Structure formats: structure tokens, C-alpha cells
Amino acid sequence: MELIATVAADYYTLETLDAKINVTENTVASWKEYIQTEKALMKAGEADESDVAQAEASLLSTETTLETLRQQVKETENSLCGLIGIPATTISRGCLDDANLSTDLLHGIDAQLLANRPDVQEAEAALKAAYYNTNVARAAFWPSLTLSGSAGWKNNGGIVVNPSKLLLQAAASLTQPLLSQCQNEANLKIAKAQQQEAAISWQQAVLDAGNAVNDNLQGWQSATARIEKEKQQITKLEETLRATRAKMRYGTTNYLQVIIARQSLLSAQLNMLADRYEVLDNYILLYQNLGGGKE
């Protein structure tokens, strides 16, 4: 289950990195086009060398980001190849936009699904074992007697001539503890304490599992809400960049505003992609925290 989740996380990391590279490459291309325009304007005496230098510095910064993203892709591919047991190679993959997640989980998850988790199953098994141990300890108070029909009362030693005597002894041991000599009573107390401890451990395991699922759902919902806001932000920043570049052509604004607008747009685009991955990551974590999925 953990291996499946890790493979899925690496795969969607690759798709997210691809999307980030695409956005960054488009920004690099835009910077190069802008620099060519500025150089032409500089030759015509309508721009100065400092404007071109600032644009080239911004281009170099973006190209550095691009190289970092490409390196992350190779590292993630190598990690994924190691997980699935193949030599390092390029991983064939789709597009982040093709990710299709069911939203049924957002409408609520039955708490009984937590029983699929290995840690909850372990705690439940320990609880059952503790109850069993308690019953064993309680049974130790009773004589080892069996009923065998015509043969009457029997124990390990054979037929019991006077079973009422043994039963009276058992009753005495239940109602009159033998203090330090009563090992059976001590064992029963220990078993009951272990039973209580196991019950608390099981309860805590379920609560922890439920909290983890709630965290995943909340993270999913929060990232989805941020994505909607970021889409609107990107639209506004694209409008701002176009307007700022137009104003600069007519000398009503300075070059710094163009740099700020372009960098703000790139930052918003990368942030949205990060949040899209967070949605996918929380979906994968739900798979783990539900013990292998909803079904």
C-alpha cells in the first residue's frame, strides 16, 4: 500500500514538474522576444542599455529556475525507477490536465472504512487478544472439569467422585482471595488492566486515523479553493502585463513595473500548479489513510 502510494506520488510529481517546465519555458520565450524588441528599440534610440540589461537578468533568473526544474525531473524519474525495480530511464507519462479525480470522497467518508487500516486492525486484534487473555485468567479460578454423559464428571485425572467438593473450592477461590498466594487473582487483575489498555490503544488508533483522514479532506478542499482564486489572479495578472507593456511603449510607465508584472504572473502560475499537486497528494494520502482505498 505504501509502495503504491509512493509510486503514484512520484508519477504525479513528474506531471506537475512537466507543467511547471512548460510555464517556465513560455516565460523564457516571452523574455527572449521582449529582449529582441528592446534591442531593436535601443538601436532606434527609443530604449537604453539598462532596460536591456534588466530584461537579460530576468531571463537568466528564469532560465536558472528552468534548469532546477529539469534536474528535479531527472531525480524524480530515478527515484521512481528505483521503486519499480528498473534501470534509470525516462518515464513515459501523461499530462497533469488529464488527471481525473472522483469527488465522491468530499461528500463524507464512513468511519467504518478506517477498519481497513493496518494499524487499526493491529489495535483491534490486540484488543481481542486482551479479552481472550482475561477469559483465560478468569477460567483459571475454575477446576478443570468436563461433563461426559454416562461417565459423569471428569478431569485430567479421571472420573471425579465428589465434584461438589471441587466446585465449592472454586467458589471459595472466587469469594475469598488468598492474598499474596492467589496467583490466579493477580493474573486476572493483570489481564483486566491489559484489556483496558488495549481498548484505549484501539480507541486512540481510530481517532488518529480519523484525524488523518479529516486533515487530507481539509487539505484537498483548501487547495481546491486556492486554485479557483489563483485562476482569477492569473487572469488579472495577464491583463496587467499586457497593459503595462502597452503603457511602456508610450512612455507612461517604467520598466520595473513590467518586470514585477511578469514575475508575479510566473509566480502565480507556479503556485497554482503546486496547489494542483497538493490536491493529488491528498487524494493519494486518503488512499493510505483509508487502508488501501474507499472500496
Image: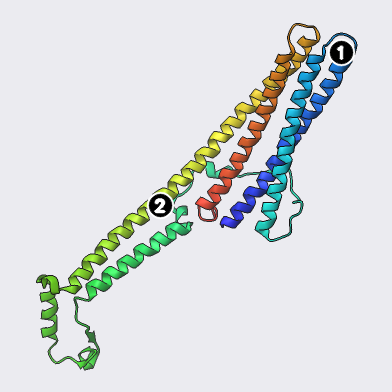
Q: From the viewer's side, name the closer residue of 19 and 109.
A: 19
- Residue plotted at (55% across, 48% down): 285
Residue 181's place in the image compared with 270, above or below, is below
Disc nearer the start of the sequence (2/1): 1
Residue 200: % across, % down: 32, 55
Residue 45: % across, % down: 87, 8
Check the image and tell me how it is coloured.
rainbow
Q: Where does label 2 land, which residue?
A: 206
Q: Where does label 1 land, which residue?
A: 42
SS label for mark 2: helix
- Residue plotted at (76% across, 35% down): 22
* Classed neighbour count for the residue bearing mark 1: other residues with Cα under 10 Å, few (<14), some (14–19), many (≥20): some
| Amino acid beneath label 2 | Val
Do callouts 2 and 1 mark residues in contact (Cβ within 8 Å)? no
- Can residue 54 be seen in this snapshot? yes
| Amino acid beneath label 1 | Met
Q: From the viewer's side, name the closer residue of 239 and 179.
A: 179
Give the side of residue 136 with respect to residue 123, left or right: left
